[in-house]
Amino acid sequence: MTDEIVAFGERLGAVFAAYGRLCVGIDPHASLLSAWGYDDSAAGAREFGLRTVDAAAGLAGIVKPQVAFFERHGAAGYAALERVLAEARDADLLVIADAKRGDIGTSVDAYGEAWLRPGSSLEADAMTISAFQGLGSIESVMTSAERWGKGLFVLAATSNPEAAAIQRAVLTQSSREGATVAGAIAAGVTSWNQGRPDAADREFGSIGLVIGATVDLAASGIDVHGDVPRPGLPVLAPGFGHQGGEVRDLKHVFGALSGGVIVSESRSLLSAGPDGLADAIARRIDEIGAVDV
């Protein structure tokens, strides 16, 4: 008998209820490795990741390894990442692989298999993905994610300033003519979630967006003042803490989307060091829990 597959959106809702909205980034870049007393190596990245998992387990419900900081160490870095991903999932943490992959055809299918397929050595619960080749380019991955009980977070409105020229560009030859690129991606993902057979019974969809906490969403063409979507739209929101996003502004920034926002923080927590990280996570969870969404 096989285990029943539970939709990612359902699991996300359970994590929100049990642990709150904080997502702890696992970003072993050189300066943090040095501050933590580790070598800038695959072994250092592994130990950094495992210490972060230990600190988060039982406090936060979500972690987000930044794949690039492991990948830069080559094959040994990937082996370190495999260990961190496995330990995090064994600790009942919801794991988002921040891989930002994207392509077309069989190439993007292969990315989906690498990061989401059950049994893969890189298996995570969700991954970040790019759809700037068109949302249709990742439709097969969205389908696979649903089948496997996994999630996707599609880049829509990121906080880096150089992204605005593309993400705020207005479509002229599309079924969503007149929308911005970011707005069209948001609308397309919302429609996908609403089109699932059991959509009316879902608190959250399994396909979400990446939207930076410091982004002007009106300028990006994403409407946050309409009705609350059903199912709710998961939003992975980096930019809180070190990058300047304030949790107290969450409802103002995200409006109708705020119920699905995952508060993602990395350096602002990780700078507490291995001995202070658990306390920093606990304090931040309390601060986020006090905010009305």
Image (cartoon, grey):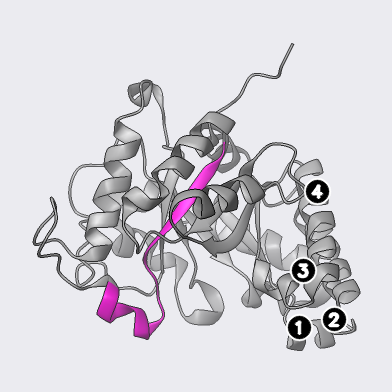
Q: Quadrant of residue 5?
A: top right
The x and y percentages for residue 89 are: 75, 44
In the rendering, which numbered label is found on residue 36? 2
Distance CA(mark 3)–CA(mark 4): 21 Å
Q: Is residue 155 left or right of residue 89?
A: left
In the rendering, which numbered label is found on residue 277? 3
| Tags 1 and 2 touching, CB below 8 Å | yes
Distance CA(mark 3)–CA(mark 2): 11 Å
For badge 4, the amino acid type reads: Ala
Distance CA(mark 4)–CA(mark 2): 22 Å
Which residue is farthest front?
A: 106
Disc nearer the start of the sequence (4/1): 1
Disc nearer the start of the sequence (1/3): 1
Q: Is residue 160 magenta?
A: yes
Q: Helix, strand, or loop for circle 4?
A: helix
- Residue at 17% across, 48% down: 226
Front residue (pair 200, 77) = 77
Which residue is farthest top?
A: 1
For badge 2, the amino acid type reads: Trp
Q: Helix, strand, or loop for circle 1?
A: helix
Disc nearer the start of the sequence (3/4): 4
